[in-house]
């Protein structure tokens, strides 16, 4: 199997999007954008001078939906007026509050409602999933994870192995790019599954790699893994709300994601969890249990015999923080204004394509993009490297910050830039490259057209 064959053919046409240089073209693209008004549903950070920032950091923390304050105020008012009765009264009582999020969240990740629950935080959910789905034996005991996985995922894997008395050296099978390359080769992943599959108990991979922005073909990887009897888990921290997902149809065993990046639900907000339908009804699966996962009809009888809910809710531990769930509901309702993930993904492909075009034409040789070129192999994020003697990448990042451009830096040498279709415009992208070019050419005060932030 070649890498080319792993690209879905019906997406090839997306590469043919035509772009032009010049500020007027950015204005034209924004004028034609059917989602341009969504920007006004978010609170935009401002500089010390009172101008809106150019915010490209939704891959780290999404902007605040304006609905969030309204929905949080509803919870606070219910608490103030009703006290404990707020669990059962009001338009959105707290006892079932997480259920108000289920259908919309399931739609965003391509799942059945019974397969999705909002609970805990991302790494906690990964641990809970590995309790249920990592069952090592003397013959099958390895966990496959990428060499450059997000550190928290790596820590979780090592500690789960240690819990079973398996050393890191014995139990971790690392996936690495070829020497001199930045990206994982999916053919190498499939070859590893074929050659070592009988020893592998679990594959834990990202939907979108946090450093490079690479999108992995989870559908194909899952198919090959299941043929070898391997469980597949996915970290969707950089994928949920960013790319189209079909977790149910892909037959992924479990997936976990945070909700504060592309899902715009606030710092440290409650995370999401997917467990495939074929697993959720198996109430005999081992798990770490808590009372919020117990059968709803008898939960308050306070018996000490755990009876798990036969949905993803059966993995809940404690009642969730309602203020955080309210912020998630605000974000999901804002996504609904866009008509779901599909139109947002279509705009995202155009935004990142436009950014890549401008960088290639305005800063060729000075800036390189390590994120895959093909739209289906990347989401919102482009990961950039600086190649000049005058500036290090870190200095370039700091100078962008001083000019009111928010990106983020990841060691050792990458600036991550994520134009998010919910609130970024094509004018934002144009101005970013304009400012970037001026800094690299030594122009301390590039002219910035703040009136072009949103097409009129």
Image (spheres, helix red, strand yellow):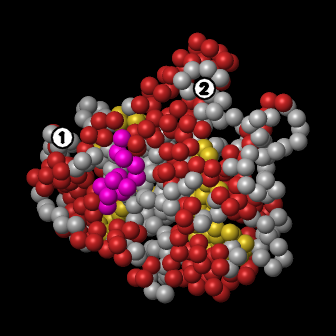
User: Residue at horizontal 16%, vertical 47%?
Assistant: 31
Residue 177 spot, x, y in % from top left:
51, 77
Quadrant of the rendering where the C terminus is positioned: top left
Residue named by callout 2: 93
The residue located at (20%, 42%) in the rendering is 454
Residue 340: within the magenta? yes
Q: Is residue 273 magenta?
A: no
Q: Residue at x 68, y 18 (%)?
A: 84
What residue do we see at 43% from left, 58% from top?
Answer: 243
Q: Which mark is residue 172?
A: none
Eyeballing the image, is 38 above or below 427?
above
Q: Nearer the viewer, residue 332 or 248?
A: 248
Image position, residue 194 (x, y; %): 63, 85
SS assignment at label 2: loop
Looking at the rendering, the stretch of residues picked out in magenta corresponds to 337-349
Residue lying furthest top: 81
Disc with the residue nearer the chain's start (1 vs 2) = 2
Q: Is 226 positioned to the left or the right of 412 in the image? A: right
What residue sits right under mark 1 in the picture?
A: 450
């Amino acid at each position: 199997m070649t890498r080319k064959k792993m690209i879905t053919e019906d997406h090839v046409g997306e590469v043919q999007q035509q772009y032009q240089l010049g500020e007027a073209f950015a204005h034209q693209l924004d004028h034609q954008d059917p989602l341009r008004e969504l920007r006004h549903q978010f609170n935009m950070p401002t500089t010390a001078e009172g101008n809106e920032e150019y915010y490209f950091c939704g891959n780290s923390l999404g902007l605040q939906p304006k609905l969030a304050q309204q929905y949080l105020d509803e919870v606070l008012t219910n608490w103030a007026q009703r006290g404990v009765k707020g669990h059962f009264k009001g338009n959105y009582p707290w006892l079932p509050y997480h259920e108000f999020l289920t259908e919309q969240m399931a739609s965003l990740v391509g799942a059945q409602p019974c397969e999705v629950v909002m609970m805990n935080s991302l790494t906690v959910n990964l641990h809970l999933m590995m309790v249920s789905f990592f069952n090592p034996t003397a013959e099958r005991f390895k966990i496959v994870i990428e060499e450059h996985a997000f550190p928290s995922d790596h820590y979780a894997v090592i500690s789960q192995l240690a819990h079973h008395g398996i050393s890191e050296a014995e139990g971790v099978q690392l996936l690495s790019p070829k020497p001199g390359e930045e990206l994982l080769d999916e053919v190498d992943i499939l070859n590893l599954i074929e050659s070592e599959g009988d020893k592998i108990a679990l594959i834990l991979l990202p939907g979108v790699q946090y450093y490079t922005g690479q999108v992995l073909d989870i559908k194909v990887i899952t198919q090959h893994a299941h043929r070898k009897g391997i469980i597949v888990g996915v970290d969707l921290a950089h994928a949920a709300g960013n790319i189209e997902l079909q977790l149910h149809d892909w037959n992924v065993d479990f997936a976990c994601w945070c909700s504060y990046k592309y899902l715009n639900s606030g710092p440290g907000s409650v995370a999401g969890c997917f467990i495939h339908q074929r697993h959720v009804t198996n109430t005999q699966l081992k798990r770490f249990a808590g009372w919020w996962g117990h059968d709803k009809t008898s939960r308050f009888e306070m018996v000490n015999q755990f009876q798990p809910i036969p949905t993803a809710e059966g993995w809940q531990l404690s009642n969730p923080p309602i203020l955080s769930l309210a912020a998630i509901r605000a974000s999901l309702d804002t996504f609904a204004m866009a008509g779901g993930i599909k139109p947002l993904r279509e705009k995202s492909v155009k935004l990142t394509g436009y950014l890549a075009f401008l960088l290639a034409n305005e800063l060729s040789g000075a800036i390189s993009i390590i994120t895959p070129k093909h739209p289906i192999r990347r989401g919102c994020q482009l990961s950039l490297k600086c190649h000049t003697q005058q500036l290090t990448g870190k200095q370039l990042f700091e100078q962008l910050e001083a000019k009111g451009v928010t990106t983020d830096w990841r060691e050792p040498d990458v600036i991550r830039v994520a134009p998010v279709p919910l609130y970024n415009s094509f004018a934002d992208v144009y101005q970013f490259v304009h400012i970037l070019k001026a800094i690299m050419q030594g122009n301390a005060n590039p002219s910035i057209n703040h009136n072009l932030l949103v097409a009129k």
